[in-house]
């Protein structure tokens, strides 16, 4: 009788790791705030800037000014 196949590790499926879980923040915006955010995004020279990325950048800018 032949031996059975040894334990073969399963391949990971889905999205690759981004370096571990981090705390998330849920923020609700008023319509006017969304409009202002979208206007800021269109003024940026980069194409394809998403709302979450724009919010991260605006937070960084605000934190740098606070120093």
Image (cartoon, helix red, strand yellow):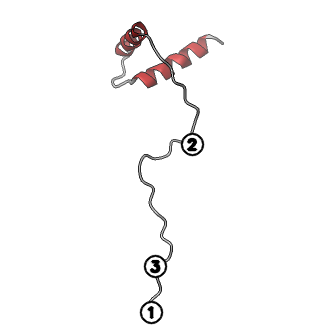
Residue 19 placement (x, y as % from top left) = 55, 42
Q: Secondary structure at mark 1?
A: loop
In the image, residue 44 lies at what x, y percent?
Answer: 38, 16
Viewport quadrant of the N terminus:
bottom left
The residue pinned by badge 3 equals: 5
The quadrant where residue 33 appears: top left
Q: Quadrant of residue 29?
A: top left
Residue identifier under label 2: 20
Q: Identify the element where label 3 is drawn.
A: loop
- Which quarter of the rendering shows the C terminus? top right
Give the CA separation, mark 1 to mark 2. 45 Å
* Picture layout, residue 48 above or below residue 10: above
In the figure, 3 relative to 15: above or below? below
Q: Mark 2, mark 3: which one is toward the viewer? A: 3
The numbered dot on residue 1 is: 1
* Mark 2–mark 3 distance (CA, rounded to whole Å): 33 Å
In this picture, residue 61 sits left or right of residue 37: right
């Amino acid at each position: 009788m032949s031996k059975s196949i040894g334990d073969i590790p399963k391949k990971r499926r889905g999205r690759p790791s981004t370096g571990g879980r981090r705390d998330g923040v849920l923020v609700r915006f008023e319509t006017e705030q969304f409009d202002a955010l979208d206007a800021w995004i269109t003024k940026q020279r980069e194409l394809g800037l998403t709302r979450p990325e724009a919010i991260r950048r605006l937070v960084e800018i605000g934190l740098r000014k606070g120093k």
